[in-house]
Image: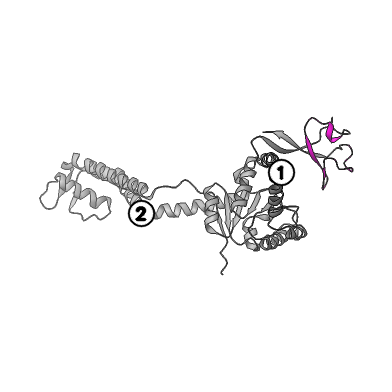
């Protein structure tokens, strides 16, 4: 199977109906014709027709059409200084505008291409500390949704997927998207992974997730990487590849099913905790000066764990001791 070429998509602009654009151009062209025709009819005495010397309304319409389309047969001509001045200062700009309207589709295409290049250049210059989501399937879409709920702006979320339909959906949803294989260096270069703050690996295959992690680590050894794995045996391989946190879907689902068999209410609470924005939420904050030296159980919020350096010390861990300066609390808050 051939690999897709790497393509960068900016968030989709609101679509413009082609029929509406054509109707607008035709309306402008018709308006110019009617305006110029009316001017010639009002000044008919200032024109002469080589056929009979007089200019009727039909002759004026004929003169208007051949003039605006730059055909100009010369059989009807302005003979007074006023008419010639009017043609030079008013009709000539109208003629130029009429030609622009006629070739408006080509001009619009060129303008749109130039605008896209400018947007791409501005995006590349400004993109910093963004989050890259590999895969825009069910897992990737939900990951993006949670990132947004946690305050990540859409312009700082970038989606990578090899399926053009998925990246088209991401672009329509308001995100920058890169179409390309998540194991290729040029894909990560297009996604500016060297400037990224975090990468979420939400691919469907564990082997692809491992290869993708190894590939992106070569581009940015310091970026924070979190990943999903279907099987527990692949989680350790992902960690060895450079993933800091792995969510094992099969084990997590199995535990929740076992818990639901005895305590369905407990599963509802767990789902509530991992659903940001409603009910109970998980939050993280630094330890305050007043809390330093106290136990995790004595602070005002329900603490589940303490992040100390690179370690996560769960509530009740004997090595936790008292809270220290620089610790971060993982706690429960009301949504």
Q: Position of residue 66 (x, y in %)?
A: 23, 52
Q: Position of residue 95 (x, y in %)?
A: 30, 49
> Position of 19 compared to 253: left or right?
left
| C-alpha span from label 2 to label 1 | 72 Å
Work out which residue is located at the far bottom of the displayed protein and give it.
Answer: 1
Q: Nearest the camera: 262 or 266?
A: 262
Say whether residue 196 is visible.
no
Q: Are marks 2 and 1 in contact (CB under 8 Å)?
A: no
Work out which residue is located at the far front of the displayed protein and give it.
Answer: 262
- Residue at x 71%, y 43% (from the top left corner): 262
- Residue at x 77%, y 59% (from the top left corner): 236
Q: How many marks?
A: 2
Colour pattern: one colour
Q: Quadrant of the N terminus?
A: bottom right
Task: State yes or no: residue 296 in magenta.
Answer: yes
Give the residues drawn in magenta, as a range. 295-322
Q: Position of residue 34 (x, y in %)?
A: 24, 43
Q: Quadrant of residue 27?
A: top left
Task: Determine whether the residue tagged by mark 2 lies in a helix, strand or loop.
Answer: loop
Q: Nearest the camera: 99 or 128?
A: 128
- Residue at x 72%, y 57% (from the top left corner): 220
> Position of 38 compared to 327: left or right?
left
Q: Which residue is mark 2?
A: 103
> Position of 89 compared to 49: left or right?
right
Work out which residue is located at the far left of the displayed protein and give it.
Answer: 52
Task: Determine whether the residue tagged by mark 1 lies in a helix, strand or loop.
Answer: helix
Q: Which residue is mark 1?
A: 262
Task: State yes or no: residue 197 in magenta.
Answer: no
Q: Position of residue 269 (x, y in %)?
A: 69, 39
């Amino acid at each position: 199977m051939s690999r897709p070429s790497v393509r960068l998509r900016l968030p989709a602009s609101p679509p413009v109906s082609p029929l509406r654009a054509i109707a607008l151009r035709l309306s402008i062209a018709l308006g110019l014709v009617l305006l110029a025709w009316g001017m010639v009819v009002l000044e008919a005495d200032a024109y002469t027709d080589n056929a009979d010397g007089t200019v009727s309304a039909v002759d004026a319409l004929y003169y208007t059409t051949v003039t605006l389309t730059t055909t100009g047969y010369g059989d009807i001509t302005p003979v007074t200084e006023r008419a010639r001045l009017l043609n030079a200062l008013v009709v000539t700009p109208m003629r130029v505008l009429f030609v622009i309207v006629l070739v408006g589709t080509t001009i619009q295409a060129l303008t749109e291409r130039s605008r896209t290049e400018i947007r791409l250049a501005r995006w590349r210059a400004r993109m910093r500390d963004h989050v890259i989501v590999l895969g825009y399937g069910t897992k990737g879409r939900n990951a993006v949704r949670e990132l947004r709920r946690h305050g990540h702006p859409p312009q700082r979320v970038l989606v990578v997927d090899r399926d053009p339909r998925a990246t088209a959906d991401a672009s329509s949803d308001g995100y920058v998207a890169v179409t390309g294989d998540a194991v290729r260096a040029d894909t990560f270069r297009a996604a500016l992974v060297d400037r990224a703050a975090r990468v979420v690996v939400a691919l469907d295959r564990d082997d692809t997730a491992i290869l993708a992690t190894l590939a992106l680590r070569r581009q940015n050894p310091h970026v924070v990487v979190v990943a999903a794995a279907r099987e527990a045996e692949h989680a350790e391989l992902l960690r060895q590849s450079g993933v800091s946190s792995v969510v094992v879907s099969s084990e997590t689902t199995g535990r929740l099913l076992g818990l639901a068999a005895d305590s369905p209410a407990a599963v509802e609470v767990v789902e509530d905790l991992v659903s940001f924005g409603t009910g109970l939420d998980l939050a993280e904050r630094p330890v305050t000066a007043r809390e330093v030296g106290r136990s995790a159980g004595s602070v005002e919020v329900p603490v589940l764990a303490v992040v100390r350096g690179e370690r996560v010390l769960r509530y009740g861990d004997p090595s936790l001791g008292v809270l220290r300066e620089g610790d971060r609390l993982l706690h429960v808050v009301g949504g």
